Image: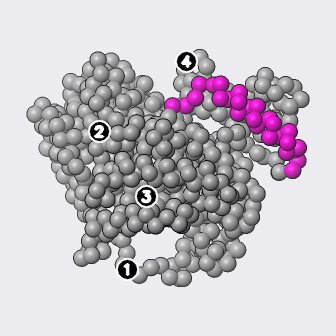
Amino acid sequence: MPNRLARATSPYLLQHADNPVDWWPWETDAFEEARRRDVPVLLSVGYSACHWCHVMAHESFEDQQTADYLNAHYVSVKVDREERPDVDAVYMEAVQAATGHGGWPMTVFLTPDAEPFYFGTYFPPAPRQGMPSFRQVLQGVHQAWEERRDEVTDVAGKIVRDLAGREISYGDDRTPGEQELAQALLALTREYDPQRGGFGGAPKFPPSMVLEFLLRHHARTGAEGALQMARDTCERMARGGIYDQLGGGFARYSVDRDWIVPHFEKMLYDNALLCRVYAHLWRATGSEQARRVALETADFMVRELRTAEGGFASALDADSDDGTGKHVEGAYYVWTPGQLREVLGEQDAELAVQHFGVTEEGTFEHGQSVLQLPQQDGLFDADKIASIRERLLAARSERPAPGRDDKVVAAWNGLAIAALAETGAYFDRPDLVEAALAAADLLVRLHLDEQARLTRTSKDGHAGANTGVLEDYADVAEGFLALASVTGEGVWLEFAGFLLDHVLARFTDPSRARCTTPPPTPSS
């Protein structure tokens, strides 16, 4: 029998609507129920495209015995971090402060007053590599709640006081000067990986905003070092497995330092930001690779993420059916030499093996390879490679596709609007500008009320109940400003002005230069 999440509009929450766990959404009634029953709250935060969220759901939340224990001793609350980034951010700060790391699924135990006292991320169904099982954690927390309540509430109080005492400096009214920007560039140079591109070690996330900073710094100062870091990083990402060599678009991150093996989920915000980065790189260098990647990424967003209402869906899952009914990470994207031969024949398959770096041992798991471009351009006939890509893409489209989170997030659609508008203008693609206009129209019709207040999410043409946060206002305003620049239509400038007026009214305090962040109340 479906639980309370059956009323949700979030695809992630709906994935849990048939769990035997008696889930509650984030609402006041859940915490009142915990207070009435005198039990703690289990807060589980994740998102639709999260691989380990699916793993923990299958191992624990779909398990009847685990669900029975949860239902007897806890009030369980499930949150979509993409719908409630405010809730996610506060408790993630607590998790990272307590454990030194974070991630999703995020597992937090709270008092009925929403005060956290025990934290974790993924817990396995049985003890593994020093981690306790989820059942052991549940039993230990229950025992502590029953037998050492004073200790639990004391810990919760200390954590809340620590969170409330943390100050986030927003600086002063002075914009960064040349000295600060030079220091930032120096720090990035120290972190830069000159052999592989990017910054730091594994895992490697596409450094979208850092690349944008480097390109702008070069445009402003002519600093060749900044351009070189941006150009080399973009080239290595575009040649790696993190980039979909058949269908375009980027996976969320690479698990290795060489950009080869991705975590296969594809997020709208990553692709919107990177589409714009590559378009700006083309503007700075004239790189044909940058042009190709910008257009392929834009086409990927329109082809695979556009919703029936004209907006853009949040994400594609990392997992998909491997053809046996089992959901496996990366199943949609990886290939073996034998699979290439089945689609292409012996001669073309040999060419594809060389061009895409496919090996008998595999670059992923079970002898499968993620397609990449280890060879330099120009070694293979371009028309032949284009034909091979088309045939492989057609064959891949016959595989079970990854699930799509159809939730439209205002902020991420603002990023997509800006990227598509600029890319369409640079490369004479009016269809991309039209796609940006359609998404902007949806935001105005469905997400924006008469007072220019934003709703964060919608799905299937219905607005959600969550109010916009700062990133929604800022990113949608930027998207509208890009549209105004590309189309010359002043109405988008006016809409951007309304949104930024709300930013100044709602998200700034002229009497303070700092802001504290207490835990959100369940009614918020």
- Residue at 61% x, 43% y is 300
Tell us which disc is closer to us: 2 or 1: 1
Q: Amino acid at mark 4?
A: Gly
Q: Give the left or right position of residue 411, taking residue 469 as reference.
A: right
Q: Please give the range of residues in magenta.
A: 378-403
Q: Give the left or right position of residue 182, taking residue 140 as reference.
A: right
- Residue at 82% x, 40% y is 385
Tell us which disc is closer to us: 3 or 1: 3
Q: CA distance from mark 3 to mark 4?
A: 40 Å
For the N terminus, the image quarter is top left
Q: Amino acid at mark 3?
A: Val
Q: How is the image coloured?
A: one colour
Whether 127 is among the magenta residues is no
Q: CA distance from mark 3 to mark 1?
A: 23 Å
- Residue at 78% x, 25% y is 343
Q: Amino acid at mark 2?
A: Leu
In this figure, which residue is indicated by the disc labeled 1? 173
In this figure, which residue is indicated by the disc labeled 2? 43
In this figure, which residue is indicated by the disc labeled 4? 325
- Residue at 71% x, 30% y is 394
Q: Give the left or right position of residue 506, taking residue 214 as reference.
A: left
Q: In this view of the protein, which residue sits in the foreground, 149 or 397? A: 397
Label located before the other in sequence (2 or 4) = 2
Query: Can you give x and y, in whole percent of width and height, for residue 520 in the image?
Result: 24, 51
Label located before the other in sequence (3 or 2) = 2
